[in-house]
Every structure is written in C-alpha cells, then in structure tokens.
Amino acid sequence: MGTRIKWNPAIKTRADRDALRSALISGKLDIVATDHAPHLLSEKEGGCLKASSGGPLVQHSLQAMLELSLQGLWSKEFVVEKMCHAPAELFQVKGRGYIREGYFADLVLVNPDKPYTVGKNNILYKCGWSPFEGETFRHSIEKTFVNGNLVFDKGNVVESAPGEALTFNR
C-alpha cells in the first residue's frame, strides 16, 4: 500500500502493530480513535517525504475493531470501552459515550451476521478510497443515530436534523 498507509504513528512492521495492540490492552493507550484524514490519492503520492500523512478510517474503524474481537484479541465490551466510554471520559464530553437516561442517543446498530466487503461502491469518504478496499468484515453497520436522529440507514446517509456542538465539562 506504500504511502497510502503513511500515518502517525507509523506502522511499519508486525512488531509495531503488535506493540500498539499490547499498549491498548495494557491500558498504556487510553482510547481508539481516528484522525480521519481523507486525503485524495494524488495527495498520497510522491514518496514518503512528500505524501500527506493520515488516511480515511472513520467509516470502517468500528468494523476493524470488531473483527479483531472475533479473532480473540479482545472482547466486544472492550471495543465499546475504548471507542465510546473512554473517549467521552478522557475529554469530559457532556452526555456522551454511554447509553444512560439524560444522555444523547448516539448509537450504532451492528449486524454481527451480515458480512460487508469494502468497495468503491460503498465508500462514503469524499476522497473515494479506503485502505480497507477489498476487505470483508463479518459485521455490517445497519444504522447510526446521532442525538437520537437516524443519520445512516443500510448503506445510505440520511438527511436528518442538524448536529449539535459538543459540550465539555472542563
């Protein structure tokens, strides 16, 4: 994949990947997030010194983490902790990160029995590519709700209520 997967931290070897996974499991890394830097392919060319750093990952990050849970690396509960609870706590985001009375209903409905293959026809990034192209995940995202509003339904972005600014307890 060359410079398409130039991002920070750099993941050059299996040892790099394994070190990041171990740090997440041990608690040395607090959260899983993506900077979502959807550079055009033309911006990822020109060698390692010229290519832009970052990649389009937000659409498939949950599926990638769930895939690793199926491989036995961690539990689904661990995925929820590192991708939902911990970021909300770390950044003190008011009313987010949990399913609780009085909290915003930010929810994802996942079908664990419907495989999903990433391809040009279902990539929602404006840049039009994904490092996961051709990859088949065993989970598919069926619906996404933000602030209780349906914003994604079976592969389609739904025009919905406008978003709201996040509030931080800092």
Image (cartoon, rainbow, N blue to C red):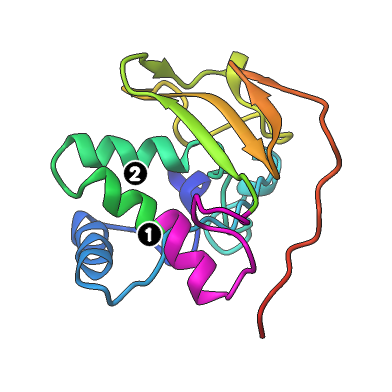
Q: Quadrant of the C terminus?
A: bottom right
Left or right placement of residue 31 versus residue 17 in this view: right
Identify the magenta region.
Answer: 83-103
Near mark 1 (Cα within 10 A), the count class, few <14, some 14-19 or many ≥20, is many
Residue type indicated by callout 1: Lys
Tell whether 66 sits left or right of 90. Answer: left
Q: Residue at x 20, y 59 (%)?
A: 18
Q: Earlier in the sequence, mark 2 or mark 1?
A: 2
Dot 2 corresponds to which residue? 65
- Residue 117 against residue 80 in the figure, above or below: above
146 and 63: which is toward the camera: 146
Magenta stretch secondary structure, dominant? loop
Tag 2 and tag 1, C-beta contact below 8 Å: yes
Please provide percent x and percent y for residue 43: 69, 48
Secondary element under disc 2, as helix, strand or loop, is helix
Q: Image point 64% across, 68% down: which residue?
A: 94
Three-letter amino acid code of the residue under disc 2: Met
Across and down, in percent, residue 92 comes to: 58, 75
Which image quarter: residue 138? top left
Residue 112 among those drawn in magenta: no
Q: Position of residue 17 (x, y in %)?
A: 26, 57
Q: Nearer the viewer, residue 2 or 101?
A: 101
Q: What residue does disc 1 label?
A: 82
Q: Quadrant of residue 149?
A: top right
Residue at horizontal 58 percent and vertical 16 percent from the top: 154
Tell me the CA gap for discs 2 and 1. 10 Å
Relative height, residue 89 to residue 64 (above, below): below
Q: Residue furthest left?
A: 72
